[in-house]
Amino acid sequence: MPSSTRRPLGRRDLLRLGLSALPAATLLSGCAASSAAPRGETGVVRYQGWSGQVTFPELAADLGLLGDLRLEWIGNTTSGPQDIQAAVTGDVDIGGAFNGSVLRLVAAGAPIRAVVSYYGSDALSNAGYFVLDDSPLRGPADLRGAAVGMNTVGAHHQDVLGIYLRRNGFTDVEIRDVQPVVVPPVSSEQALRSGQLDVSTMTGAISEKAEARGGIRPLFTDFELLGAFSAGCYVLREEFIAANPTTTRTLVGGIAQAVRWSQTRPYPEVVARFTDIIRRRGRNEDITTARYWRSSGVAGPGGVIADREFSIWLDRLVESGVIEPGAVDVSRTYTNAFNPFA
């Protein structure tokens, strides 16, 4: 469907669709990078943060990689899907989420473009699907009818679970019998230990602390299932890119350099920088969370996006009937045109 005939998504559409979008419109190439926004382009980029975490736009600003661009923090997000919905509705200029969530919005008609990867899974940073040590769940066949806790549905943890089950012989009907249960990450360990869940998905500091307390074990991790991969991207509205090509190049280029900085600097240096940023910004956060940072998990240098990092999720979404065959062209869902490492 040509972009000129699409009706922009409103908040009611997003609530009705949950997460779900047509191919993004024509690729908009940027102009030469500049430290200052030219006349007519915005010099302020609105975004949401994460409590106790440093986002790559924040790191880029702290490292002086955004030139004269100023970030405007409007609050913290509760999930990736919520963050990119805020970008679609124009409440923020940039948002980040799991690539499968991006595909859902693109398939529903959202005029957005993924521009740089910002998180992923590797041997150091990944999502684990944990059970109690004495749980009878030992393999995929045992998950029939199980309640699996995750931070949100229609996103990373649910789609990884779907691929895990499909690869282990589950039909789509059987996969639907495995119940996703939305649990705030801070409650995931307690929900598992109290018997409210059969499986709990945990990452980062939460999983490390839970494992240190003992009594739990991972059934599998997304890294064991899929290898190292970038899992989520920052997205921009296409109208933002069209109206602000130089700002876009500066913003994305700065984020890409910040990602590369985290990929190449010694671990203690990155943790120290994150801790200092969290302390200085004064948002009444727990600064100890930064100590559990192990890696960005981003596979491509500087967050360069690989086709596989969208196609693997699109294949599953089409197979499960969430997205119609041919509704999304992966090559028009993302662009590396603004990334200096591409």
Image (cartoon, grey):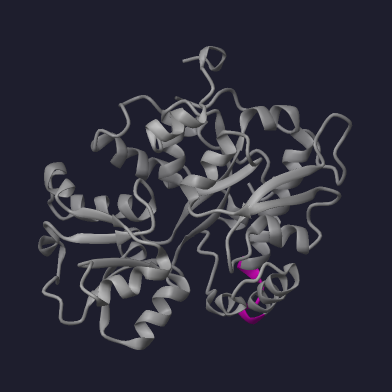
- Which residue is more in the foreground, 199 or 33? 199
Residue appearing at x 20%, y 60% in the figure: 147
Q: Tell me if 172 is positioned left or right of 87 in this view.
A: left
Q: Is residue 127 magenta?
A: no
Q: Is there any visible trace of residue 137 in the rendered image?
A: yes
Q: Is there any visible trace of residue 218 in the rendered image?
A: no
Q: Is residue 54 above or below residue 330?
A: below
Residue appearing at x 54%, y 74% in the figure: 293
Q: Is residue 203 above or below residue 340?
A: below
Principal secondary structure, stretch drawn in magenta: helix
Return the x and y of residue 217 as percentages of the image width and height.
26, 78
- Which residue is more in the foreground, 244 or 223? 244
Q: Tell me if 247 is positioned left or right of 77 in this view.
A: right
Return the x and y of residue 66 as percentages of the image width and height.
79, 52
Residue 173: name its quadrant.
top left
Question: Residue pushed farthest bottom?
Answer: 213
Return the x and y of residue 211 as percentages of the image width and height.
35, 82
- Which residue is more in the foreground, 150 or 34? 150
Question: Residue pushed farthest top?
Answer: 5
Q: Tell me the magenta residue range.
A: 263-268
Residue appearing at x 19%, y 49% in the figure: 166
Return the x and y of residue 253 as percentages of the image width and height.
72, 48
- Which residue is more in the foreground, 226 or 316? 316
Residue appearing at x 63%, y 54% in the figure: 75
Residue 15: name its quadrant.
top left
